[in-house]
Image: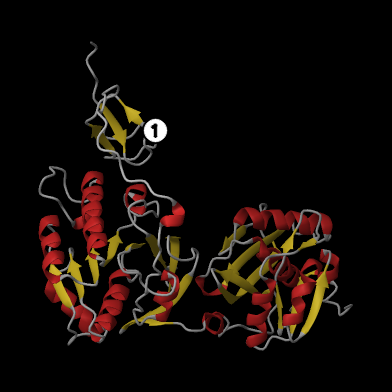
Amino acid sequence: MAREKTTFVCAECGASFYRWSGRCPQCHEWDSLEENRAGPGQRTEPGAPAAVTTLGAIGVESGVRVLTGLPEFDRVLGGGILPGSAILLGGDPGVGKSTVLLQALGRLAARAVPCLYVSCEESLEQVKMRAERVGLGDSALAVSAETSLESILGLLAVQTPAVAVVDSIQRVAAGELDSPPGSQRQVSTCATALTEACKRDGCVLFLVGHVTKQGNIAGPRALEHLVDTVLYFESERFQSLRILRAAKNRFGAIDEIGVFEIGSDGLREVGNPSELFLAERDTGASGSVVMPTMEGTRALLVEIQALVGPSNYGTPERKVSGVDYRRFSMLLSVLERRAGLKMGGCDAFVNVAGGIRVYEPAADLPLVLALASSFRDQPFFPDAVSVGEVGLGGEGRAVSRMGERLKEADKLGFARAVIPAGNSGAAERFGGQVHRVRHLGDAFGLFSGER
């Protein structure tokens, strides 16, 4: 009988190898190969058969969600936290992950909800200083500074909290493993044990995860598959805004966002982000067009800015911030070929004010209008919004959820809307004047007052 060989499986990509390596030859991740104790060809004896039932015989009870007291946070979670759910929160260092969780737990504890905050990186004194800064110095929130997996599991068994936070999972270590904290094996083992314990007791578990240089949560596949919800806290450098985004949610919609503003007293919720994004807009400047974009179920009004001018050097400079560069380059070619705007020798810069990112095709029409406005040095209507996709033939194409976009524009007092002709049916929800665009020529005619 041939001797069975030990294999090593990559926890990131799942590839199998017969030799251990510090770096996976398939996905090139470091410290991701784990020994497969059951060698290839090993037979497993069948055990007792598992119970089987039919879908019709399964009764489902709707879980009652618990509100954290932070409406923006609850929105991203799908309307509150669901008992027994595991939630992973990632983001860059200093973005506000610990602060938003401490604020949420502080409000829950004020309503007599049993909560536990386990700090694995900061001492209790440091947690106290952070709590005083956000106004929770006298809170009844239970806190602990611990890094041992066995001790944290014991805390959960004794305290029986309804909501628990482990900040961060990369600092937790299981005593039975020889690998250092933060390694792939430690992170997977500790996250699995904590998740199983909290699901068994109906406790909501928040795990804070560090972000790698590539912008992913360390050990992304190992962690994201273990939890029910994955949240990312994002920010632009030198911006005070923080955007909380759901990348995975088994109990709610994905791509929902919550908007916060960071200050000396912690994170403050932004109830109407559209007003904040447009607060400093110069309505008389050329190259400025307002667009209603969709983030999850929410419509936001953002300002797309463009600056076009003759190039002083041989090669024109093109830079964008907040939009897709490849789509921007495509639209420049459409403007050259279909609209006759000679931009080949011009520098072109595009920015979405406020640090927001808009990557949906619905940004095409406001983007070309902003470029044309700056190229001609003619301001666009200051009381107008625009949204729509633009094809390679220069035609305007309909986009989804136009009614919700126009409703948000109407609420903020905009009197005009420039939309594709295919979305005319949604125009009845808008109280102002609607300009229907079949081709770019229809949109550019607005600059000279032809329509």
Label 1: which residue?
A: 26
Residue 386 seen: yes
Q: Amino acid at mark 1?
A: Gln
Tell me which colouring the rendered structure shows.
secondary structure
Up/down of 160 relative to 434, above or below: above
Total marks in image: 1
Between 215 and 74, the one nearer to me in the picture: 74
Dividing the picture into quadrants, the one containing residue 139 is bottom left
Dividing the picture into quadrants, the one containing residue 169 is bottom left
Q: Residue at x 17, y 63 (%)?
A: 120
Q: Residue at x 29, y 24 (%)?
A: 40
Between 61 and 286, the one nearer to me in the picture: 61
Residue 377 seen: no
Q: Which quadrant holds the C terminus?
A: bottom right
Residue 395: percent from left, percent from top = 81, 60
- Mark 1 crowdedness (10 Å alpha carbons): few <14, some 14-19, many ≥20: few
Residue 350: percent from left, percent from top = 62, 66
Between 194 and 286, the one nearer to me in the picture: 194
234 relative position to 94: left or right: right
Between 190 and 21, the one nearer to me in the picture: 190
Which residue is most to the top?
1
Up/down of 136 relative to 324, above or below: below
Q: Which quadrant holds the N terminus?
A: top left
Which residue is most to the right?
450
Q: Secondary structure at mark 1?
A: loop
Up/down of 325 relative to 37, above or below: below
Q: Residue at x 85, y 66 (%)?
A: 441
258 relative position to 159: left or right: right
Residue 426: percent from left, percent from top = 74, 75
